[in-house]
Image: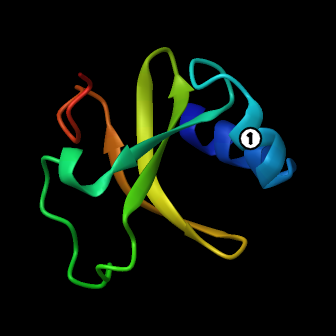
Amino acid sequence: MALSKRLFMLSRMPWKQIRQAPSSGIGSEQIPRYRIKRAIPTSVTDEVESFSSLHFVGKKRFVGYRVGQIFHILWVDHSFEVYDHG
């Protein structure tokens, strides 16, 4: 439920506003491809050099990439295992 609410809220915002917001709030964090610890689907070409990580509730995140105005969600990261958090 929290993920669908966050997606609905973000769908009403311009990408520029999401990119400029703090990553701990409604903003996103850019994750370089080499920091991803899960298998990247073969449908994601090497042209995708980084992924975006966004909060949806507490510190839980969803991770994906954007092509034009479409955001493709690849992982829902409940336990901080999708990428190296540094």
Residue topped by disc 1 = 18
Q: Amino acid at mark 1?
A: Ile
Residue 70 rendering spot, x and y as whole percentages:
65, 72
What residue is rendered at 77% in x and 53% in y?
15
Asked whether, in this view, residue 65 is left or right of residue 9, the answer is: left
* Residue 17 vs residue 7, the one in the foreground: 17
Neighbor class of circle 1 (other Cα within 10 Å; few <14, some 14-19, many 20+) is some
* Residue 86 vs residue 56, the one in the foreground: 86
What residue is rendered at 21% in x and 82% in y?
42
The mark tally for this picture is: 1
Asked whether, in this view, residue 76 is left or right of residue 40, the answer is: right
Residue 50 rendering spot, x and y as whole percentages:
39, 57
Q: Is residue 69 visible?
A: yes
* Residue 71 vs residue 30, the one in the foreground: 30
What residue is rendered at 48% in x and 62% in y?
65
Instruction: Check disc 1 and report its element: helix, strand or loop.
Output: helix
Residue 54 rendering spot, x and y as whole percentages:
53, 37
Residue 37 rendering spot, x and y as whole percentages:
13, 46
- Vertical side of 39 occupied by 17: above or below: above
Q: How is the image coloured?
A: rainbow
- Vertical side of 29 occupied by 34: above or below: below
Q: Is residue 1 visible?
A: no
What residue is rendered at 58% in x and 31% in y?
2
User: Residue 49: which quarter of the image?
Assistant: bottom left
- Vertical side of 46 occupied by 1: above or below: above
Which image quarter is the C terminus in?
top left
User: Residue 27: which quarter of the image?
Assistant: top right
- Vertical side of 33 occupied by 59: above or below: above
Which image quarter is the N terminus in?
top right
